[in-house]
Amino acid sequence: MIFSRKSQKQRTEDNRKRRLGTRREATVKPRVDMAMVKRFFLYLGFGLVAVFLCFYGLSSAGPLVQEGQVSRIRITAEIPFSYVSEIETSKRMEAVRQKVAPVFLLNLEPYRNFRSYMERLGEDLDAFAKVPENTPEDLARLQVAEVEAFLAEYAAGNPFSLRPNDLATLHNQLGGERLRASIGEGLIVLGEIFRKGVYPADTAFNIGTGERLSLFTVEDEFGNIQEVQILSEEEGLRTLRIQLAALDIPRESTIALFRILRSALRPNLIFDSERTQDRVLAAQESLKPTIIEIPEGQSIIEPNSRVNALQYEQLEAYRKALRQSEAGDFGLNALFYERALLTLLLVMGAVFFLKTSRHKVRHNPRIFSLSGILILCNLGLIRLVIELGDSVLAESTPILVQLLPFLVPVILGPMIITILVGAGPGILAAGLVSTLNAMMQGNSLSVLLLSQLVCLVAIAYCRNIQLRASLVRAGSISGATMAIGALLFGLRDNLPLTMVLYQILASVGTGVISGVLIVGILPILENLFKYTTDITLLELTDFNHPLLRKMQLEAPGSYHHSLMVANLAENAAAAIGANPLVCRVCALFHDIGKMIKPEYFVENQRSGQNPHIERNPSMSALVIKSHVKEGVQMAKDYRLPKVIMDVIQQHHGTSLIQYFYYKALQQQKEEGVIESIYPNAPRIELNQVNEDTYRYEGPIPQFMESALVMLADSVEAASRSLKKVNPQSVEELVEKIFMARLKDGQLDATPLTFKQLIKIRENFVFTLLNMLHARVEYPDGKTENGGGNRARKRAAAANQELPPPATSGD
C-alpha cells in the first residue's frame, strides 16, 4: 500500500480539534440555513410552475376524442349541466315529418277526357248501328267486324284501345237508351274512383320510413285540401268491378263494360313537394327543442368503449359547461387541486431521490436550473400540442385529435438532460415528464406506459453520445418504439388501417424531429449555461484545431508532452469511472500557455540554450507560473469550454516549483547569515526565500478529471528523468509523486477515494511501462566484439545521468 494510516498522535490531535469545534458550535446560537431556504423555495417554485403549465385552464373532461374513437378513460360529469340535444331534437323532428301526411294534387283531366269520349262514341256507335224497325233481330245484331270497321274509320280514333267485341256485346245486349244509361252509371263509378285518387300499383308513396301510408292530404279540383284514403290501381279496379256487378245488366255486358272502363283507370295523383314541406315545417316549428339534464357524477363516456354521436355531443356540452363554470374561479376546481398536489408530491420525491443519491445536481444550482428549465420547457411543448385538440384546426381536421398522443415530444427534456447531466437525472426527468403527460391526457395509463418506454429507449441510445448525428439516430429509434406502440394500440382498439398508418408515421416523424431539434438546441444550451457535452469535447480532439496546430509548430515538446498526459489521464479515467473524454481534451489543451515563451520549458529546448541560467530563481518561477494565466487567456480567446479553463487553472494546483525553490534556497545558503549582537536573539537571514513565490496560484483541483490531469502531468514529466525504466523504478516514481501531492493537500478538494487512487497508480504504472519500453538494438554492421554498440550504450547512459534544468511537472 502506498498510503499509510494516520499515526496515533495525528488521530489524537484531530479528535481534540473536533471536540473544540463542537463546544464552540454549541455556544453559538443556531442560525437559519439560508442555502436550505433558497433550495426549498427553488423546488417549490419549480413545482408551482409545473402545475401552472400542465393543468391551469386544462379541461377536466380529459383529452378530446372524436366520434367513433375508443376511449380508454371514464369521463364523469364533475358538475351538473344541461344542454339542447341537436341529435335528439333531430330524431323528434324526423318522427314529426314522417307523421305529416304528404300533399297531392288530384288530376281529374284523364277522367273527363274519357267520359266525353265515351259519351260521343256511344252516340256515334248507336247512329252507326241503327237499322229499320222491322229488321229481323239476327240481322239487327252488330257484328264485331262492323265495329272494327267503325273504329278504323272513326274520327276520334281509338286512344283507349277499346275492344270491338266489348262494344258489340254492349250494343247487342243493351242497345239504345239502356246502353247509354249503363255507360253513364259506369262512368259515375269510375268518376268516384278518380276523385278518391289513384296511385300506381308499384309505388307506395313512402316518405322516409319505408312504410306505406293510407291517409294522404289531397287537394281537389276546387282547391280544397282534405285527408282521404287513396287507392292503388289494383284497389281501384277491384272497386270498379264490385260497383259494376251491382248494375242490372247481363253478366256478359258487365264484363264488357268493366273492360272498357278499366282501360281508362290510371294514376291521377301528383305529389306537391312545396306544400308538403310547408306542412312539415309548420309541424316542426311547433316542436320544442329537446333538453337533456346531466346530474353531477353521471358517467358520460365509459372506458374501453367506442364513442357514439350522442356521447360525443354530451362531451362537447360538458366541455362548454366547464369553460363557463371555470371562468369565475380561473379553473381552480377539485380536479386541479388534486393534480397540483400530486405534482408537488412528485417533485418532493424527485428532490428526496437526488438528496439520498448525493448526485451533483443537488449541489450545483446551475445544473439544477438547467434540468428544471428543460423539464418545464418540455411540459410546455406537451401542453401546447394538447391544446391543439381544442383549437379550430382540430375542428377542421378531425384526424388530428387521434394523432395528438403520438405528436407529443416527450423525449426532448430527458434526452438533453441525459446528454448534459447524466443518465440518472435523465431517467428521473423521464418519469416526471411521462407522468405529467399522462395526467394531462386524462390520467391515461396507456399514455404513461408508452411515454415512459419511449423515454427510456431514447436515454439508452444517447448515453455517452459523441456524434451529433447519433442524436437523430436516437430520436429515430425512440420514434420507431412509439410507432410499435401505436400499432399495438391500433390493433387492440380495432382502428382502421389508415388511421393506424397515420399514427405510425406521426410517431416516427415526432422522433426524428425531436432528434433534429436537440442537435440545434444543444449548442445554445452549452453557451447559455457554460456546460460542455461530450459531443463538443470530441470535436475539440481534432488535431487540426488552430491551437493544437499552433502548438505543434511553436512548442512541439509541450505538444508531445500533452499527448502523453492525455493518454495517461484518459486510461486512468476509464479505470475509475470518470469521464475519459474530458481528461483527454483537457490534457491536450492544459499547456497551451507555454506557447507564449516555449523556450523556457525544458521539453522545448532543442538548441541547448537554457534562458533560466541568466535569470534568478524567482524570475524563472514567475515565468513558469505565467503559463497558467496565459493558457486561460488563450482559452478565452478561442472560446474553449469552461471545463478546459478550469483544468488549465487547476492542473498545478498550489504545488511548489521545486527546482527553482531549492535553487533559491541554495543561493541563500551560499550568501550566508548575520548573527545578532544580542544574546539569544534570532539570526537575520539575507535574501530570505518566500515559499509562496515558488508556488502556483491554483486553485487546487476541484473535480476528478482535473486531479487526474494534475497527476498525469506530474508523472509524465518526472518519468523523463528516469535513469532506468523498469516496473520497480516506475512504481517508486509514481508512489513518490502521489504521496507528495497528498501531503501537500493538492487532492483535498477532489472526491477521489484511496481505492480510486490505487487504481490510478496501477493504471499509470502500466501505461508508463508501455510508453517507455526499450526496443531491441539493431546491429550496424560492425562486428569487433560489439565495440561500437557498447560505446553508444555508454554514451546514452552518460547522457541520461545529466539532470534536467526544469520540467513542467515540477
Image: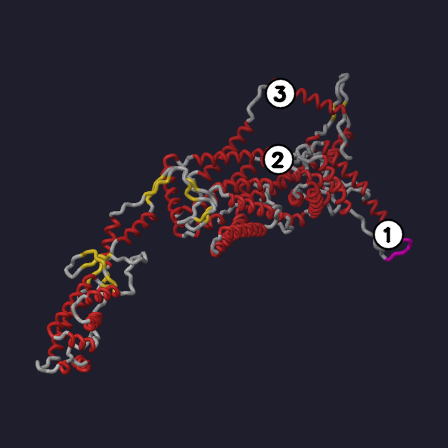
Mark drawn on residue 357: 2
In primary-sequence order, the first of circles 1 and 2 is 2
Q: Is disc 2 placed on a helix, strand or loop?
A: helix
Contact between marks 3 and 1 (CB within 8 A): the answer is: no
Whether residue 584 appears in magenta in the rendering, the answer is no
Question: How far is mark 3 from mark 2, CA to CA?
Answer: 28 Å
Q: Amino acid at mark 3?
A: Glu
- Residue at 83% across / 52% down in the picture? 777
Position of residue 386 measured from the top left corner of the image (x, y, whole percent): 45, 45
> Measured along the vertical axis of the image, is residue 339 above or below residue 788?
above
Quarter of the image where the N terminus is located: top right
**In front: label 3 or label 2:** 2
**In front: label 1 or label 2:** 2
Q: Is disc 1 placed on a helix, strand or loop?
A: helix
Residue occupying the far top of the picture: 679
Q: Quadrant of residue 740?
A: top right
Q: Which residue is mark 3?
A: 25
Quarter of the image where the C terminus is located: top right
Please give the range of residues in magenta: 781-789
